[in-house]
Amino acid sequence: MLHFSGMELMTWTGSLLWPFIRIGAMFVSAPIFSASSLPVRIRVVLALLVAWLLLPVLPAPPVVDLLSADAFLISIYQVLIGVAMGFILQMVFAVFIIAGQSIAMGMGLGFASAVDPQNGVQVPVISQSLLIMITLIFLSLNGHLLFMELMAESFELLPVGVIHPDPGQLWQLVVWGGYMFAGGVLVAIPAVAGLLLVNIAFGVASRAAPQLNIFAVGFPVMIMAGFVLIIQVMPSLTSHLSTLLFDAVTLIRQLLVL
């Protein structure tokens, strides 16, 4: 009959529990996995499965009483790490939501909104279309495998039990959020600039021919021009997504080794 000491049981439990907490926290904030349409039960099972698969390659966890204050502090830190990693990746997808909102406002379709199944909020239909397209591109680029690689690498760069909170890390996340707003404008600026030229053309036409009904002609023309410009922007979406993902992974690695 096998006998296990209490410390051995705590070590084995902690070796699975803390990776599960970090991975589960990442699933809460990461794109695709944090979709409101994905049941919580599936997220929990998936996080537990990934933690169990990564268990053989993870560094040995610290031997800590699971009911102690140290264990609670380690658990909180794992949650913060996972949420921060997921937030950085989530902001990559937010770039294209911002771009879609800018284009929709220029087209006059800012009022046309739909529920985003991932976040459960109202977004313009242009943003929703771009988000679906980016999700498909993300999966075609093996972005889901990038998740797994980041999870495994995070335990090597910042093992469980190592705690070094740094206020500079929070500031880097704030700067990253601002960088994402700039990225959204960069993605949308070709279409927005084209729509601005169309508006200028209508302004000149209305001055040259005052009898022209701008409201009757301008709205459908702006919509058609907007869709044409979106089609022109589509080929660059893959390169934008690849660049943003590379920057996101680089930032995550920098935060983990600080």
Image (spheres, rainbow, N blue to C red):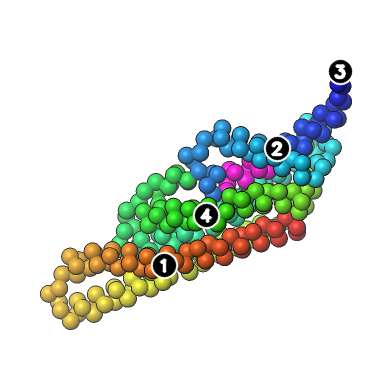
Mark 4 or mark 3: which comes first in sequence? 3
Q: Nearer the viewer, residue 82 or 233?
A: 233
- Comparing labels 3 and 1, the label whose residue is closer to the camera: 3
243 relative position to 186: left or right: right
Q: Could you tell me the amino acid type at mark 4?
A: Ser
Mark 4 or mark 1: which comes first in sequence? 4
* Boundaries of the magenta span: 20-30
- How much space separates mark 4 and mark 2, taking CA atoms? 26 Å
- How much space separates mark 3 and mark 1, taking CA atoms? 67 Å
- How much space separates mark 2 and mark 3, taking CA atoms? 26 Å
Q: Which mark is residue 1?
A: 3
Question: How busy is the neighbourhood of tag 4: few (under 14 within 10 Å), some, or many (20 plus)?
Answer: few
Chief secondary structure of the magenta span? helix
Q: Secondary structure beneath disc 1?
A: helix
Q: Nearer the viewer, residue 200 or 43?
A: 43
Q: Nearer the viewer, residue 134 or 26?
A: 134
Expressed as whole percent of the image width and height from the top left, the position of residue 86 reads: 60, 50
Q: Which mark is residue 21?
A: none
Q: Which mark is residue 140?
A: 4
- How much space separates mark 4 and mark 3, taking CA atoms? 51 Å
Q: Is residue 48 magenta?
A: no
* Residue labelled with disc 1: 233
Q: Are marks 4 and 2 in contact (CB under 8 Å)?
A: no
Q: Secondary structure beneath disc 3?
A: loop
* Residue labelled with disc 2: 52
